[in-house]
Image (spheres, rainbow, N blue to C red):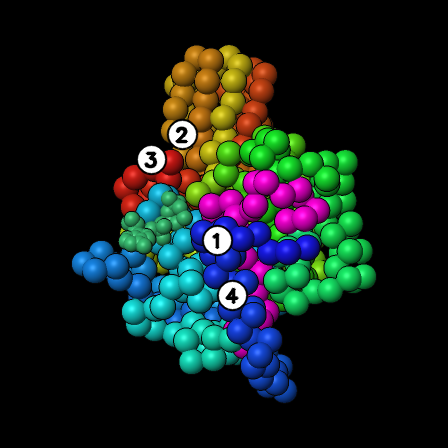
Amino acid sequence: MAAPNRELPGLRFKLWRLADEFRLNFPPMPHRILLFMIEVEQLRKAFGELVAVDGVSFAVQPGELFGLLGPNGAGKSTTIGCISGLLTPTAGRVRVMGHDVVSDGVAARRALGVVPQDIALYEDLSAADNLQYWGGAQGMRDPALRSRIAEVLELTGLQDRAREAVKKFSGGMKRRLNMACGIIHRPKVLLLDEPTVGVDPQSRVRLLEMVRAEARAGTCVLYTTHYMEEAESLCDRLAIVDRGKVIAQGTLAELRSVLGQRDLLRFTGRFQPDAVRRSLQDLEGIEVVQAEPEVLILAAAEASRRLPAIFSALAASEAEVRETTLTRPSLETLFIKLTGKELRE
Ligand SMILES: Nc1ncnc2c1ncn2[C@@H]1O[C@H](COP(=O)(O)OP(=O)(O)OP(=O)(O)O)[C@@H](O)[C@H]1O
Ligand SMILES: [Mg+2]
């Protein structure tokens, strides 16, 4: 298939050009065991006066799903741009598979797959032709490319629409194809920039499954999002970013412990507020947040383990409990605590 003659703006097009470049100059991989496939050290990127990324550091292992969680303008796409070679860092170091992205960019980019935030597809081409094009740009050839195209079409659930022009696709279908183009060449390091924005729930589920499958297969995945639920359900570790800085980093459990927050227990039923307070006051570490005749809210560390003691104290106060819900400290509450604002602006 001939390359379309109009230029596709954006990251993937530039990667294609770089891919062309690296086929001419293919340096050997260093023979050492890599602990981290992405290493970002004190990364800084300024656009004139504006410092979009301000001293960001993190590292991601093979098979790990690392999240960059932050609101609009936090610097997520700029960070991805510096890793992929689209942008040149103002200061700091970025290595991919041990290769410095500035001094050894060709080798660094060889391992990369990128799913850009702005969909990078040829609208007039079919799904299969887009995959053929991007696979070819990454140096893949038939018959391996043909069978891989069938595989990713199946993974994305687009096999029945493979021959249709992309312009007829829904937003969710385009997002799925955008993802397929990023993984067609089985990259060892996958950069995903908000890949589920604006998709229907069905496409979201499929996309998230694909991301998990990539990590399970050993791919090092960097996933940016401003959806805290996605970060919570998907990522092994994450960095919360705001205004170009990492404000917290770690596993979900570590971040929750930074929060130092207790679980919230909400009971509905019939309560005698004074009697409930008296009855619960002997239980150490349990705070009554709200006690009303029909609602009772308690805060406690490791609340699920304290439930039996809480229920017997409630029974002693002659409370009738109809429903109980336990809410764990969330990234949203952590973000509010650290920045004083909500993640969704
Ligand atoms: N090419 C550019 N020139 C000037 N400023 C830029 C450029 N790219 C990004 N910025 C600015 O850098 C900051 C970080 O932008 P970036 O796109 O990295 O944020 P983001 O976290 O990806 O946000 P979103 O969730 O909206 O995609 C913003 O203030 C943005 O306006
Ligand atoms: Mg962005």
120 relative position to 287: left or right: right
Residue 312, compared with residue 328, is above or below; it is: above
Secondary structure of the residue carrying tag 3 is loop
Which residue lies at the image location 76% right of the left edge and 40% below the top edge?
159
Residue at image mark 4: 17
Residue at image mark 1: 7
- Of tags 3 and 4, the one toward the viewer is 4
Q: CA distance from mark 1 to mark 4?
A: 11 Å
Q: Is residue 263 magenta?
A: no
Find the residue positioned furthest to the left.
49
Q: Quadrant of residue 71?
A: top left
- Among numbered discs 2 and 4, the one appearing first in the sequence: 4
Query: x%, y% of residue 201?
Result: 61, 31
Q: Quadrant of residue 72?
A: top left
Secondary structure of the residue carrying tag 2 is strand
Tag shown at residue 288: 2
**Label 2 is placed on what type of residue?**
Val
Q: Is residue 129 magenta?
A: yes
- Among numbered discs 1 and 4, the one appearing first in the sequence: 1
| Residue placed most toward the observer, 319 or 53 | 53
Q: Which residues are magenta?
A: 107-130
**Label 3 is placed on what type of residue?**
Glu
Tag shown at residue 261: none
Query: x%, y% of residue 216?
Result: 69, 58
- Among numbered discs 3 and 4, the one appearing first in the sequence: 4
